[in-house]
Image: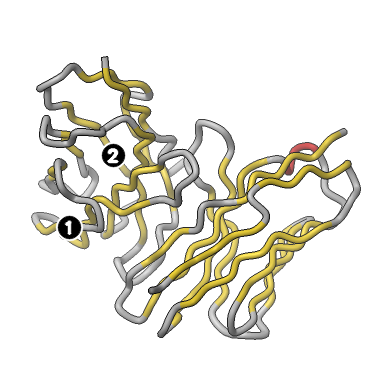
Amino acid sequence: DGGITQSPKYLFRKEGQNVTLSCEQNLNHDAMYWYRQDPGQGLRLIYYSQIVNDFQKGDIAEGYSVSREKKESFPLTVTSAQKNPTAFYLCASSIDQGDQPQHFGDGTRLSIL
Amino acid sequence: EDQVTQSPEALRLQEGESSSLNCSYTVSGLRGLFWYRQDPGKGPEFLFTLYSAGEEKEKERLKATLTKKESFLHITAPKPEDSATYLCAVTFLDDKIIFGKGTRLHILP
């Protein structure tokens, strides 16, 4: 079955460390997204990508970076500049960027050691 | 300021007790309204898309409706497996999307 695979499911970051969250999709979707989910808040958009080698900042991009070298893959790096990285991170995709996110992965929970 | 507000924050129902969840929005240039279901520790699962006032969509025990300022997710004769957090999201003419904070629904057997 087609879907989105996020890994790892749980991740711990030390102070000053960069960590990378993986997101792979086999849906042949053009658009991919990264969202952050915090308790009591709605999903907030970090970055999105409409096509390979192109991506745009979302509402809370500071302290994060992404790449889109392949259609199937959209990894997110949480840098040491992100001072409050503890959250549930969700990757999503849609057929194109004009659509709402149609498929979500099962998330990565990032915590600080 | 564009906003999406879901109410109530949490709802406990007995099995078989029908009710409705609300999603109100103050946006200009609405393109669409979307409902998702999210189970604990999982990603959201897409349920419905609504585009214009008066539109309705149904899936099993769920029915979503849309007016000019709000949407309702009606749950008829719910079962314990309907327990989840239900998220509402709205997109605008510039493709921006805003998610509500969700309603946590718990169905007691």
- Percent x, y for residue B108? 84, 35
Q: Quadrant of residue A84?
A: top left
Q: Quadrant of the N terminus of chain B?
A: bottom left
User: Is A47 left, or right, of A7 in this rendering?
Assistant: left
Does B90 appear above or below A85? below
Element under disc 2? strand
Q: Residue at x 76, y 62 (%)?
A: B74
The subunit letter for the residue under badge 1 reads: A
For the residue carrying disc 2, how many other residues have a C-alpha within 10 Å: few (<14), some (14-19), or many (20+)?
A: many
User: Is B71 left, or right, of A110 in this rendering?
Assistant: right
Q: Residue at x 17, y 26 (%)?
A: A19
User: Is B85 left, or right, of A59 in this rendering?
Assistant: right
For the residue carrying disc 1, how many other residues have a C-alpha within 10 Å: few (<14), some (14-19), or many (20+)?
A: some
Which amino acid is tagged 1? Lys
Q: Which residue is mark 1?
A: A57
Element under disc 1? strand
Same-subunit check for callouts 1 and 2:
yes
- Percent x, y for residue B103? 63, 50
- Percent x, y for residue B99? 45, 59
User: Is B50 left, or right, of A100 in this rendering?
Assistant: right
Q: Residue at x 55, y 69 (%)?
A: B49
- Percent x, y for residue B50? 57, 74
Image coloring type? secondary structure
Which amino acid is tagged 2? Glu
Q: Which mark is residue A24?
A: 2
The subunit letter for the residue under badge 2 reads: A
Q: Earlier in the sequence, mark 1 or mark 2?
A: 2
Rounded to the nearest whole Å, what is the CA distance between mark 1 and mark 2?
Answer: 20 Å
Q: How many marks?
A: 2
Return the residue nearer the eye: B31 or A40: A40
Q: Quadrant of residue A26?
A: top left
Q: Which mark is residue B63?
A: none
